[in-house]
Image (cartoon, helix red, strand yellow):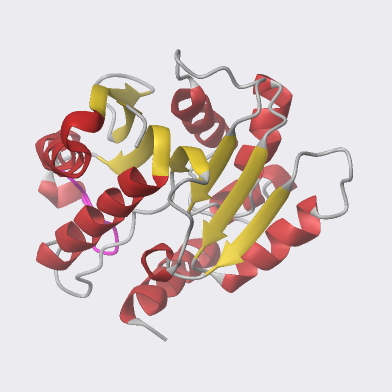
């Protein structure tokens, strides 16, 4: 098992151990994959998919990096009338096993596939995905037990570079925002990125393909959760 896999599995195991079993099934599920509430999860889905230049009811292909149980697919269908292809990938086998159980018996849903493994180690077709959404790829401190540092930054740079290379027209990426939470309040197992670092990584990866870049923090501008939307010209 790679160190990244080990740290990620341990991160989510600790989060799951802290979940109140008296919560609703929906809340327990959202908490198990890292969200503080169902509302926060749904708001992330809304921001990540609110791409004005994307017509979701047309035949588009989506890659969901760090997909958890694949609930983004349900959101796209119910809120965006999405009928295109969906691929989800997660490093935790249990997440993918449940995602398959949830979605594979629903014949009325769009074509979907779920892959298990480290996204950086997967061989994927660079012409296959129009939109790549990554809401669960950058939350784990790759330097642990040391404070967030160089290993996490290097991982983020590689992840962003590969996402840009695989995406035809758009990327949405979630990251814990270091600019909006003081050091003393940071959790040791989590990674926190400066907006300027994420912006520089995208510009380096995109080059002239970057048409537009927007950072959205929620639920308020002072919140620590941030999603960056990037519009790309086609490869």
Q: Residue 84 appears at what percent x and percent y? A: 68, 34
Q: Residue 71 appears at what percent x and percent y? A: 65, 43
Front residue of 55 and 40: 55
Where 70 sits versus 114, above or below? above
Front residue of 3 and 162: 162
- Residue at screen point 16% across, 57% down: 153
Residue furthest bottom in the image:
1
Q: Is residue 202 magenta?
A: no
Where 119 sits versus 112, above or below? below
Instruction: Locate the C terminus and report the quarter of the image it occupies.
Output: top left
Main SS category, magenta section: loop
- Residue at screen point 42% across, 74% down: 10
- Residue at screen point 67% across, 20% down: 57
Q: Is residue 85 visible?
A: yes
Picture quarter containing residue 95? Answer: bottom right
Instruction: Locate the N terminus and report the quarter of the image it occupies.
Output: bottom left
Q: Is residue 91 left or right of residue 108?
A: left
Q: Is residue 90 left or right of residue 200?
A: right
Residue furthest top in the image:
52
Magenta stretch, residue numbers: 186-193
């Amino acid at each position: 098992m790679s160190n990244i896999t080990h740290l990620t599995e341990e991160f989510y195991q600790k989060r799951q151990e802290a979940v109140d079993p008296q919560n609703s099934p929906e809340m327990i599920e959202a908490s198990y994959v890292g969200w503080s509430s169902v509302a926060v999860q749904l708001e992330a889905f809304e921001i990540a998919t609110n791409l004005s230049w994307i017509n979701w009811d047309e035949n588009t292909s989506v890659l969901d990096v760090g997909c958890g149980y694949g609930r983004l697919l349900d959101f796209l269908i119910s809120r965006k009338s999405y009928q295109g292809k969906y691929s989800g990938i997660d490093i935790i086998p249990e997440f993918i096993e449940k995602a398959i159980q949830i979605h594979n018996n629903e014949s009325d849903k769009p074509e979907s596939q779920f892959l298990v493994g480290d996204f950086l180690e997967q061989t994927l077709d660079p012409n296959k995905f129009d939109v790549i959404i990554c809401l669960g790829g950058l939350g784990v401190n790759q330097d642990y037990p040391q404070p967030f540092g160089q290993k996490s930054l290097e991982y983020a740079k590689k992840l962003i570079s590969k996402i840009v290379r695989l995406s035809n027209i758009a990327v949405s990426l979630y990251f814990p925002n270091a600019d909006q939470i003081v050091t003393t309040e940071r959790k040791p197992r989590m990674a926190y990125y400066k907006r300027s670092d994420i912006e520089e990584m995208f510009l380096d990866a995109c080059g002239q393909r970057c048409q537009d870049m927007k950072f959205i923090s929620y639920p308020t501008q002072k919140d620590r959760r941030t999603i960056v939307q990037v519009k790309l010209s086609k490869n």
